Amino acid sequence: MRKHYIDNLRSLAILILIPYHAAMAWNTWGEPNYMMFGQDRVLSSLIVFFSPFLMPLLFVLAGMSTKFALGKRTAGRFVLERVKRLIVPLVFGTLAFMPLMVFLADSHNCKYDGAFLSHYRVFFTKFTDLTGADGGFSFGQFWFLLYLFVISLLCLGIITLQKKVFAKAAGNPSLWIIVLFGLPVPFVSGLLKINGKGIVLYTYLFLLGYYVFANDAAVEKIRKLRFVFLALGLCFDLANIWLFLWSGASYEILNGITNDMTTWFMILALLGLGKEYMDNCGKLSSYLSKRSFAFFSLHYVILVVMQFLIAGAFKSNTMMLYSAPVLISYLLTFLLCEVFVRVPILSFLLGVKPVTNNGK
């Protein structure tokens, strides 16, 4: 039986990416971004609020989905589907969308004055920090697809080995054991980080999704204490924001602790809340779930184009410069999603199933 709250949580997380990525243009800690408009602590607080748990949640959900996928597919078919769903849009997005985003970044941030087509050579020959903010090569948001593919294959090997050694892995731990699974998070979060993205942490969360959270009984235990986990997650999150942005001092160790605890307790809270309130499949839920991956691939290039075009008109008005591209990007992304999901070759390039005229 399909777990609709998994699809709904994934759709919600992906929808948040537009305001999240838009706010990065004002981050106060100097992280390179395609558009840089200055510094703003309020908008930076939005980033710091979501960053500890937004992408980690997606890896947990991916692990849960893998559990159900391997229940119906052979390992070989699973790998083939991962290639179609992850590698194809990774290559297409990197070749089709990233050169435009990086060209606009180079033009805005570094005053590049050459033509767009001539910048292709810069994109494929300039390798710096992989952010793309200086006109160099970047995977952009498609890093997620690359990580997810690598982690899926790695975990498939672990799962296959486990099945040979132990016929059945325990998947229904007590609530306190589930909570204690968060203890390794601070120790693995800093390992093998590339541009702030920890492959060890994401692998650990993926495996927890597969072995623990895919079990209905385990999620049911979390559901009963969803508001407790939410309260803890929000307390750690607000403390993290204050320590990092508003305290006026450096608390690196405390920041690390509050960040990691936010990651864990917000994941638990969202799984519990999702199970309680989002385990349904109405028209809106079905619509979003069929377009979430297309939305993921398309949203960022549209946002960067909008920010670039609107920057001149609202340069001194932060509220308008933030909100106008966000609202327009939502509209245009959904419109472009309709084009991509209804044209078979385009839906293939984004790794999504084509949608027919009747919406199925």
Image: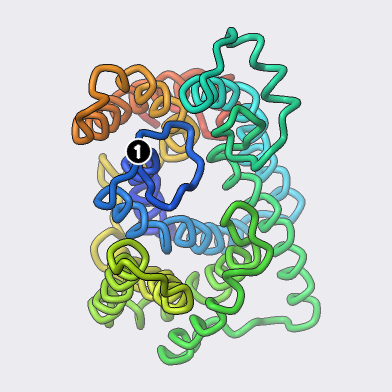
State left or right for residue 231 relative to residue 338.
left
Residue under the point 65% across and 42% down: 129
- 53 above or below 19? below
Residue 236, image x, y percentages: 32, 75
How many badges with numbers are in the image? 1
Rendered image quadrant of residue 5: bottom left
Q: Which residue is mark 1?
A: 38
Closer-to-camera residue (243/334): 243
Q: Closest to the observer: 92 or 210? A: 92
Q: Quadrant of the C terminus?
A: top left
Is there any visible trace of residue 286 in the rendered image?
Answer: no
- At label 1, the amino acid type is Gly
Left or right, residue 268 beside residue 147 = left
Percent of width and height locating residue 335: 34, 21
Tell me which residue sits at (51%, 41%) in the image.
32
Residue at (32% x, 22% y) in the render? 311
What residue appears at the point 34 percent right and 27 percent down from the top-left corner? 334
Task: Answer with left or right where residue 204 lies relative to residue 43.
Answer: right
Q: Position of residue 19 (x, y in %)?
A: 31, 41
On the image, the x and y values in percent for residue 199 come to 64, 61
